[in-house]
């Protein structure tokens, strides 16, 4: 197969992070959680680097250890494409992406 000159194929060996949705708190009765929140962001991991694919909102990224302690916190803006996690983090962690709404996305990663 012939490729156009200057074409560099994008090859990335990474794994998608399965994200679920959680409710931060019940909130007031008149302000329920949206029935159809935005789709979760597409997050991939390669080594200690998280990749955010496509359009996404801004989030607070929290990495939690097995005891539920936050071991890393940073802001992920809508233009963030990658987040490099500290190389000192090793093992399984919970990843949480808190939105400005009353919900968050969570999943598990192995570093």
Image: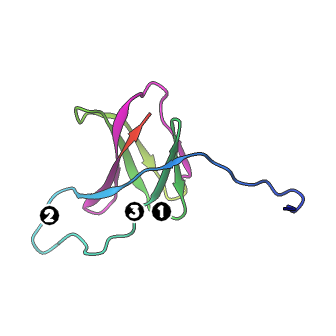
Please report the bounds of the magenta region as a residue range. 80-107
Secondary structure under badge 2? loop
- Residue underneath mark 1: 56
- Residue underneath mark 2: 27
Counting residues from the start of the chain, the first of labels 2 and 3 encountered is 2
* Measured Cα–Cα span from mark 2 to mark 3: 21 Å
Q: Quadrant of residue 101?
A: bottom left
- Residue underneath mark 3: 40
The residue lying toward the viewer, choosing from 12 and 104, is: 12
Q: Quadrant of residue 46?
A: top right
Secondary structure under badge 1? loop
Secondary structure under badge 3? loop
User: Which residue is situated farthest in the top direction here?
Assistant: 88
Residue 92 percent location from the top left of the image = 36, 34
- In the image: residue 7, left or right of residue 81: right
Identify the residue shown where x is 47% and y is 53%. Answer: 43
Q: Are marks 2 and 1 in contact (CB under 8 Å)?
A: no
Q: Where is 40 relative to 63, above or below?
A: below
Q: Where is 1 relative to 63, above or below?
A: below
Nearest-to-viewer mark from 2 and 1: 1
Counting residues from the start of the chain, the first of labels 2 and 1 encountered is 2
Residue 82 percent location from the top left of the image = 55, 47
């Amino acid at each position: 197969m012939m490729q156009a000159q200057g074409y560099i194929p994008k090859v990335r060996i990474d794994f998608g992070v399965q994200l679920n949705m959680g409710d931060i708190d019940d909130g007031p009765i008149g302000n329920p959680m949206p029935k159809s929140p935005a789709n979760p962001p597409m997050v991939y991991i390669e080594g200690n680097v998280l990749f955010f694919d496509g359009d996404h909102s801004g989030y607070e990224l929290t990495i939690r250890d097995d005891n539920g302690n936050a071991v890393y916190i940073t802001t992920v803006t809508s233009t963030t494409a990658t987040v490099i996690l500290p190389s000192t983090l090793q093992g399984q962690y919970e990843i949480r992406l808190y939105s400005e709404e009353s919900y968050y996305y969570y999943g598990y990663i192995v570093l």
